[in-house]
Amino acid sequence: MPGNWTPLITLALMSQIVGQGLLIWALPRFSPLVVGLTLLVQPVVAAVAGWLIFHEMLSAIEIFGGALVAASLVLIRLPNRAARPI
């Protein structure tokens, strides 16, 4: 148990206040698509940052998941193709 809880409580409160505050701030300023995609990218960016900065090992399933998120971002940005009559 930590002897001083102040850093832990400050970190928890600030991450929530700043994170949720920025999310609420962004909603009226950006499209819901941009906000949603940003939330999807967060875990991938955190995993890559951990790999680059802290030399953490990524498992095959984590890399596969990141690739799926990246593929979904590419697919969502493709031009909309209406169904063509047969």
Image (cartoon, grey):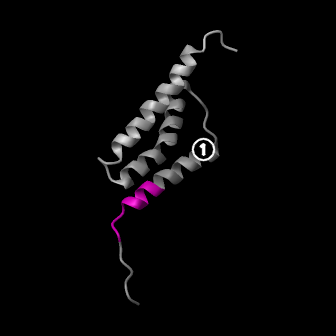
Q: Residue at x 66, y 13 (%)?
A: 2
As drawn, the residue found furthest toward the bottom would be 86
Q: Position of residue 79 (x, y in %)?
A: 33, 66
Find the magenta span and give its range.
Answer: 72-80
Whole-percent x, y for residue 42 in the image: 47, 41
Residue 36 or residue 78, whichever sits in front:
36
Q: Is residue 49 left or right of residue 26?
A: right
**Is 40 situated above or below 21?**
below
Q: Residue furthest right?
A: 1
Quadrant of the rendered image containing residue 20: top left
Residue linked to disc 1:
62
Task: Examine the rendered structure and indicate whether residue 78 appears above or below residue 49.
Answer: below
Q: Is residue 42 magenta?
A: no
- Secondary structure under tag 1 reads helix
Viewport quadrant of the N terminus: top right
Q: Quadrant of the C terminus?
A: bottom left
**Percent of width and height locating residue 22:** 38, 37
Residue lying at 50% horizontally and 51% vertically, measured from the top left? 69
* Label 1 crowd (10 A; few <14 / some 14-19 / many >=20): few
The type of residue carrying mark 1 is Glu
Predominant SS along the magenta part: helix
